[in-house]
Every structure is written in structure tokens, then in C-alpha cells.
Image (cartoon, helix red, strand yellow):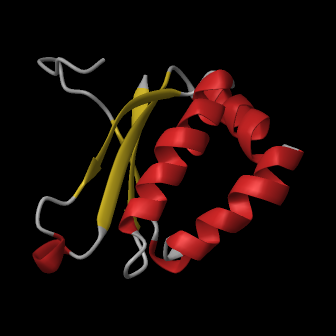
Amino acid sequence: MFFELRQYNIKSGKREDWIQLMEEEILPFQLSKGMVVVGSFVSEKPEEDGDLYVWIRRFESEDQRENLYRLVYETDHWENNLGPRVGELIDRENISVTRILPTSKSIIR
């Protein structure tokens, strides 16, 4: 099992639009395909941290991750509807994705 820690910079003035898109469309779509989203977060002080958005997904294996990526990102709905809207709201050039493993005492598994 591993997690993806995904960090995005939201474009200036687009924070609420991004949160709405994620919570009302992207997350439900990904969850319907089998993605496990552990949580999503925004910076407490955007004036200091910029408009940071962080979310975490869990995968049981690399095979599962690859399959879920196909089920989500290789669909007409993603390619023609959601994907283009993502690019309007976040800085895609500065996306950070870090694969992380839980330690033995982690409550998130």
C-alpha cells in the first residue's frame, strides 16, 4: 500500500472555483471509478502559503494505481470536460506528486 500526496497551486482568485469543482465533480467522479481519497486540504493562510491545495489518494498496489488512472484519465468525460477545466484553475506546470508510505504507527492505512 502507498499514498499519493498531491500538491497544487491554485490560480489567483480561483480558490473557491477549484474547491467547488473538486468537491462537486472531480472527487465524486474519481470515487465512482474506485479511487480512495483519504483527504483534501487548503492552506490555512493563503496570504502566506499561496493558494495551496493538497489531497491524498491511497492505492493497494502499482497495478491498481495504473488501472484506476486508466479508468479516470482515459475517459471522454475527463479528456473533454474535467481535464480542460482543471487547467483553467490550477498551475499544471507546478504540480507536485509524492509517493509516500505509512509508518508502522500511522493511523492512516
On the rendered structure, is 101 left or right of 86?
left
What residue is rendered at 47% in x and 51% in y? Answer: 20
Q: In the image, residue 15 lies at what x, y percent? A: 37, 66
Residue in the foreground of this view, choosing between 36 and 85: 85
Residue nearest the viewer, comparing 65 with 55: 55
Q: Is residue 104 above or below residue 35?
A: above
**Rendered-image quadrant of the C terminus:** top left
- Residue at figure coordinates x 70%, y 54% from the top left: 82
- Residue placed most toward the observer, 27 or 54: 27
Asked if residue 5 can be seen in this view, the reply is: yes
**7 lies above or below 33:** below
- Which residue is depicted at the point 34% across and 58% down? 53
When asked about the image quadrant of residue 107, the answer is top left
**In the depicted view, which residue is nearer to us: 101 or 30?**
30
With respect to residue 104, does 78 lie above or below? below
Q: Residue at x 42, y 53 (%)?
A: 19
Q: Give coordinates of residue 67: x percent, y percent.
A: 73, 30
Q: Report x, y in % for residue 86.
A: 60, 64
In the rendered view, does 84 fall on the left or right side of 17?
A: right
Mark yes or no: residue 74 visible: no
Image label count: 0
User: Relative to residue 85, is residue 56 drawn left or right?
Assistant: left
Which of the 4 quarters of the picture holds residue 44? Answer: bottom left
Q: Residue 1 location, x and y as percent? A: 43, 22
Q: In terms of image quadrants, where is residue 33? A: top right
